Amino acid sequence: MRSRPSLPWFLCACLALACVLPAAAAPQVDGRRVSVGAEDARLFLEGRFPVTQDALGGLVEVTASRPQLEIPPGSRVRLSLDLALATMGGAPVPMGRADLSSALRYDAARQAFFLDQPRVEAFHPANGGEGLDAKTQALVNAWLADYARSEPVYRIEPAIAALLGGMQVESAGIEDGRLVVTFDREVGMAAQAP
């Protein structure tokens, strides 16, 4: 009869993965919960930038760079980004820095957190002007909605996510400055499944 791995084995495997994959964020496992701190989420996010996406049906490209993520108390994260705009295949022209706030949604199929209902809280124009005009605001909002649908703020490391297969997500959100996913049973039990 084959013995099953124990919870300490699972935790050791998580630590080993964290050491082998230093660029990846290392989640913390506690019973039914998997959580990640702001610094780990920030490292994950920084590795995905700069991001360039079409906007307005491909008429322009918006490039976002230099992300800064904060997870303050409450239910929304703060994200600051430098934005640049390119039209007709031209070089990107700096627009400025956008300060956003957003709730988060967890996509169980992709095992990742995404922005949910993001909004621009402040905008600091690159040229020192007076904020966003209506057209630029519409462009930033269109880009932001597309980004929120497609790009994760944090994704659980694939090797750990594989151990969570078959587990159901009961809740996900922000708690005590961490991104937290709560499953239907103890995470260690996934490592013990045959």
Image (spheres, helix red, strand yellow):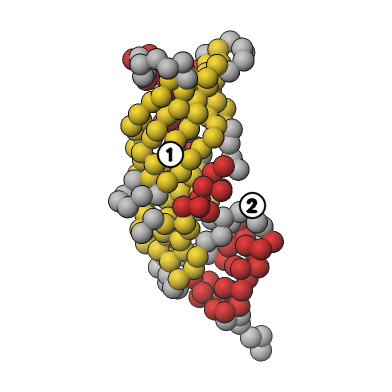
Q: Quadrant of residue 2?
A: bottom right
The C terminus is located in which quarter?
bottom right
Q: Seen in the image, is 177 located left or right of residue 5?
A: left
Q: Are marks 2 and 1 in contact (CB under 8 Å)?
A: no
Q: Quadrant of residue 32?
A: bottom left
Residue appearing at x 46%, y 52% in the figure:
38
Q: Residues within 10 Å of mark 1 (few under 14, many from 20)?
A: many
**Residue 143 position in % (x across, y down):** 45, 26
Q: Residue furthest left?
A: 74
**Residue 55 position in % (x across, y down):** 49, 21
The residue labelled by disc 1 is: 79
Residue type marked 2? Ala
Q: Secondary structure at mark 1?
A: strand
Looking at the image, residue 180 lies above or below residue 89: below
Residue appearing at x 61%, y 54% in the figure:
24
Q: Secondary structure at mark 2?
A: loop
Residue appearing at x 56%, y 48% in the figure:
43
The N terminus is located in which quarter?
bottom right
Q: Earlier in the sequence, mark 2 or mark 1?
A: 2
Q: Seen in the image, is 126 located left or right of residue 138?
A: right
The residue labelled by disc 2 is: 23
Residue appearing at x 34%, y 46% in the figure:
76
Q: Residues within 10 Å of mark 2 (few under 14, many from 20)?
A: few
**Residue 30 position in % (x across, y down):** 45, 71
Q: Is residue 109 visible?
A: no
Residue type marked 1? Leu
